[in-house]
Amino acid sequence: MRVVALLTVRNEELFIAKCLEHLHAQGIEVCLIDNGSTDRTLEIATRFLGRSIFRIEHLPFNGTRELQLSLLNEERLAREIEADWFIHHDADEIRQAPAPHETLLEAIQAVDHQGYNAINFDEFVFLPTSDDESFVNKDYVQEMQHYYFFQPKPLHRLNAWKKNDSIDLHSQGGHQVQFSGQKIYPNSFVLRHYIALSRSHAIAKYGSRIFSKDNLSKGWGGSRVTFVPSQLNFPNRDQLKQFNNNYAWDKSDVWTVHTFIGTSRDSYYPQNLTLWQNKVKSENYPPMPIIIGAGRSGTTLLRLMLDAHPDLTIPSETHFIPELTQLEGAEEAIREQFYNLLIHHPRWAEFHIAAKDLKEESDKIQPFTISEGLRAFYRLYAARFKKQRWGEKTPSYGRHLLTVKTLLPEAHFIHIIRDGRDVALSLKSLWFSPGQDIETLAVDWVWKVREAKQQAQLCPHYLEIHYENLVTDPVSTLKQICEFINLPYKAEMLEYHKTALNRLNEFSDHPALISKEERLAIFQNTTKPPDTSRIERWKTEMCLEDRKKFEQIAGTMLRDLGYSTESSLIIEPEQQNAFLSSLQQVKQNLLNSQAWLQNISAELQGL
């Protein structure tokens, strides 16, 4: 009998060797589908050709996790490949027969002999039990000892089946294969799921995973869709079961969600977005550029460039739009709350708008909506400079694209992205830095980029530009932006630095945090022409250890964005042995040199 595992992988260098070794020992052949890996996954897998792998397919990566596309591809392969049984398999899984003395192949043969055509697997999820525990570059199958039984619904992992050209694997996200005449084996097999090997690995895995629009619409991914690194919380050992080797799996405590990832979705999908959607007027407005990006990615530079356009102005950061979705009550109550929120906001003084003018403009709006109230605010700001169009630059709105898009349908998001290692160098010493250590900075950058890119799939107007392109070729980049927002390109934008200081002087002291002078010092480079020396600072200013730490978390995101990386997550045993051998040789050479010097010294003393 021939059993084939359909293994779709992307950047699984930490798991792929162990997975393939296990499948080979279990008598299972592998058709590997590589979904555009940028790490060493494919390099490692190629070594198994002719052993466990008999075929390698390539599925292009289009920037997002497209689960349905992957599953449809596996359905095609299951029709094409001549085999008796198939398993939909992931690289971080170890699958076993129910009895310890049987291989997976032998157990499936027995199931087939009894006339069954589908097998379910009980899923046991293994985890580190503290933030300090790491199984990266270790034999995680042997060393990870604590698990929970995961079963959000019956037959949760029904994904091994006898060949049938009419199977449906994609409708249930690969968890439950469907076909007519299904006869499910009554005893579940075992699936050991190594979902994360360390805190950094969990963040790298889920923090950089961007789910496709199709996945989002189907609700696939659960809390992983809205994963927030700060919510990551591994359970304590006493919350988990202790693994033993007698195959007595403990299913007494059933988990239905991966709670360690976090479950909050409030900040991603505000509950009353639908309410405000219904209140937005349908009039056409010119495209409103909204600049977003991780802090220190060039958002202020781009703001000043666009603001130098004779027809467009952009205020300093507002920050209050997400708070507006919390307003409740009848129309007049909303109008009053809107007015009070803005004029008492910590940033209000920086807009230099008289409170009475905002009150007068908001009172004119009939009926009042938050959307029209916002437009009145921006219109008043633009009037200060005798300009007809306005924009917005608040980097944190990259985590609230759906909210902003709902309240301002004319929003055209411009996401400026900069190499995260340079962002870390620029950010770590500033008052708004998330932390000083390189891992925290890497987490912050990955999460902010990922959130914007994922939510952008649900926004009709979104453009990505790179800071490096803006600095090295500002004309082409600004022309691209102007076309995106339907604004004629003007050369005055290149002269932004001449008026930058005047525009930045709108800053006020940040309450209880930082003075105006200190804020101005942070942005002093924007008062000069574009400086290409700010590009790839990490190559000379970031030590090798910090580079490796940063890339362990952000490597996938960096490579997906077109940035090069230098370090690898995994050190294979042969590499470790070679390294140790080299150290021994160096040690021996030093000892030989020491002996030689002692002999020379003795000879010199005898002269």
Image (cartoon, rainbow, N blue to C red):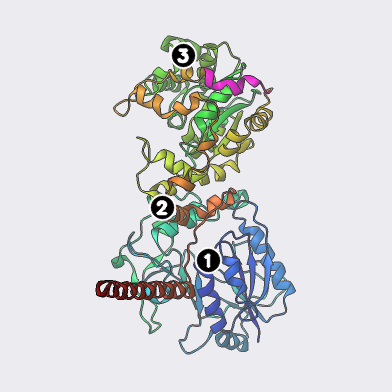
Is 37 rendered above or below residue 164? above
Point out the image quarter for the N terminus: bottom right
Is 526 rendered above or below residue 417? above
- Residue marked by disc 3: 358
Residues in magenta, as a range: 489-498
1 vs 2, front mark? 2
Residue occupying the point 56% across, 64% down: 40
Q: Main secondary structure of the magenta part?
A: helix
Is 28 rendered above or below residue 231? below
Q: Position of residue 93 (x, y in %)?
A: 50, 71
Sequence order check, earlier mark of 1 and 3: 1
In the picture, the disc for residue 591 is none
Residue occupying the point 56% across, 46% down: 454
Q: From mark 1 to mark 2, how far is it between C-alphas?
A: 21 Å
- Residue marked by disc 2: 546
590 or 48, nearer to the observer: 590
- Residue marked by disc 1: 13
In the image as oriented, which residue stretches furthest toward the right? 80
Q: Residues within 10 Å of mark 2 (few under 14, many from 20)?
A: some
Sequence order check, earlier mark of 1 and 2: 1
Q: Is residue 372 visible?
A: no
* Amino acid type for the residue under numbered disc 3: Leu
SS for dot 3: helix
